[in-house]
Amino acid sequence: MKYTGLLFLILFSFGAVWAQHKALADDTLQLTYRNIGHHQLVRNEPYFDVMTFRRYRPLSNDISPFSRSGNNGLPSHSYNYNTQDWNSANLLGGFQPLLFTKDSLRFYNASKPFTQLNYYNGSKSEQQFEIFHTQNLGEGMNLAFNYRRINSEGFYIRQLATHTQFNATVNFKSRDQRFHADLFYLINTLENQENGGVIISDNESNTNNTILLDINLRTAQNQSRTQNWGAKSSYDFAYRDSTKEPLFSVSHEFNWLKAHRNYADNFTDAPDFFDVNIFNGAQSNDSSFAQTISNEVLASIYEDQFQVGARNEQLQWFQNYLINEETSSNFLVANANLDVIGIRFAADFEKGISGFHKDELDLKLNATFKDIKSFQPKLYGRLSRKQADYLLANQRANHHYYNFSFNTSNEVQVGAKVTQEKHQIMLDVNYRVLNNIVYLDSNQLAIQESDDISVIQVNVRKNFKFLKHFALNNNIQFQAISNTTVLPLPTLTTFHSLYYQNDFFKNSLNVMLGADLAYIGEYNGYAYSPSLAHFYLRNENSPMLGNIFQLDLFVNLRIHKAARIFVKMENITGKPFSEESFRIQDYPVPGRVLKLGLSWRMLN
């Protein structure tokens, strides 16, 4: 009876949607979005896309394998190396991929009020509910909000995850089109039990009862929260001509980001898990806080072809009343967007000039060329110097008490990308040289690697269509890292979808039936620290992780544009309760699991 309610809701939705079929046939909904401040980069919202709906986990890249520590809502990290960059939310560590952030927000324009409900259900009380609504409030103004609730009991003892997340955006422009403003607010409240990892002995590895599996921690928990609100506004003082292209504009952006995490544990039942107890040998109650308040002013000329300005950041860090640090940083910022002999050049420059970030530098360059026989080539590069997060380099917690002074982490990157929409081809190749990267060693101490590390990354995507209704989508990611002791990530990860897709009942019902296959190559990987909420290096003698295949079977349905449904059997060949499933040390991934999802659109 576990899924009776959801199945009833699915059946009910069929009747309701068919009752609306006549109205939907004349559907004129136009829904577009953009990111904050980017008024020219407008995209269509694929609210009826059935392809990605089944990939329900809230991750930025939904077609790449990712490391996870169990059920939905638990810490995870990318298998691909990304540029080291820190902000106040860094103290949430492995929970960061789950967060609503300013960069993930969308500012909408809707031809009519639009609401969408998403619901996902799985074993062990795993549920995820989302509601999204947007509508224009008169000419030139739009309001949108998104609410997400994740609740999962987990397959192993003390893995309960309870997350509540919300964001709201408002964008508007004046009647004369001179004034534009984007406003937003978001909040992420995460509550997680921490079991410290599962202990699997030889005589327990084949059990099907998770209650029999021991764990390292029995009372630990992390309670985290981020809040972020801000506004970006601009005013066009002069136009180039009657086309209303701005000749000179001024913009201002305000941003306030606050993050808090509390780690609590009574570890008398697990006295050997922590090597050090600084304040109390029986319990921990560590509280960490970080805050950034920034103001940025930019002057733009020739339709934003050139922008120059400055930003001030007020920074604060707090931990257990032993750290209470406040400082201010100032930056020079500039960017350019030019069309020269048919090539689109873009450059972004940011340089710290005082305060905590005074040594930072971030320079990005892009050149997008005209299509060559329907192929669009692009060259890009980046030079960055980033200061490590203060609370990563300084700790005054019960199990972590240290103080380090780090130089900036440096990176030089060059790359090339080619895309072709007609045949759905993408090839992206980049080369990086890293210096002074910061990481947590096997003793959970922050370390800076002075030697250079080189990384080559190749990402290939190709989608095939054959026999009219069949398709095979492929995403292959390869990376070669010169020092896998410091960056213990897999060389190869792949994701493939093979499916049959067809329309029935006069195109009212779209059916997709298929399988997803993911492969994760062998790698040394990371362990997870509940008290820091960060990943750290495993012991060098630990057995390798990875060399994992995961096979999912799915059925996706789309009823006109009003409803989407999926039924998916995840990891059907995976061994339950096995060390072979580790993506992160001591955190097994569940075996075969049934997942159901329903998305329902409503027009007002």
Image: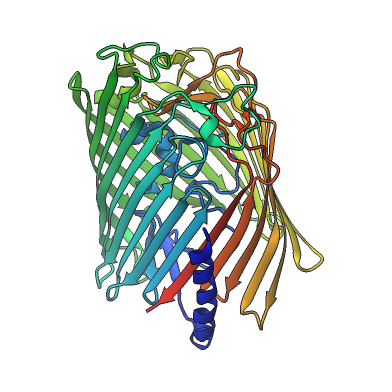
Quarter holding the C terminus is: bottom left
Question: Residue, x 62% and y 44% (percent of image)?
Answer: 417
Give the percent coordinates (x, y) of residue 579: 62, 28
Give the percent coordinates (x, y) of residue 419: 65, 51
173 shown above or below 300: below
Question: Residue, x 63% and y 31% (percent of image)?
Answer: 578
Question: Residue, x 43% and y 65% (percent of image)?
Answer: 117
493 shown above or below 254: above
Give the percent coordinates (x, y) of residue 538: 54, 18
Give the percent coordinates (x, y) of residue 350: 36, 35
Residue extending farthest right: 467
Q: Nearer the viewer, residue 296 or 392?
A: 392
338 shown above or below 269: below
Inspect this view and state whether residue 262 appears. yes
Residue extending farthest bottom: 22
Q: Nearer the viewer, residue 154 or 463?
A: 154
Quadrant in the rendering for residue 550: top right
Inspect this view and state whether residue 376 appears. no
Colour theme = rainbow
Q: Is residue 328 left or right of residue 187?
A: left
Q: Is residue 51 left or right of residue 383?
A: right
Q: Nearer the viewer, residue 253 or 306?
A: 253
359 shown above or below 449: below
Q: Is residue 251 left or right of residue 303?
A: left
Number of numbered tags placed on the structure image: 0
Quadrant in the rendering for residue 375: bottom right
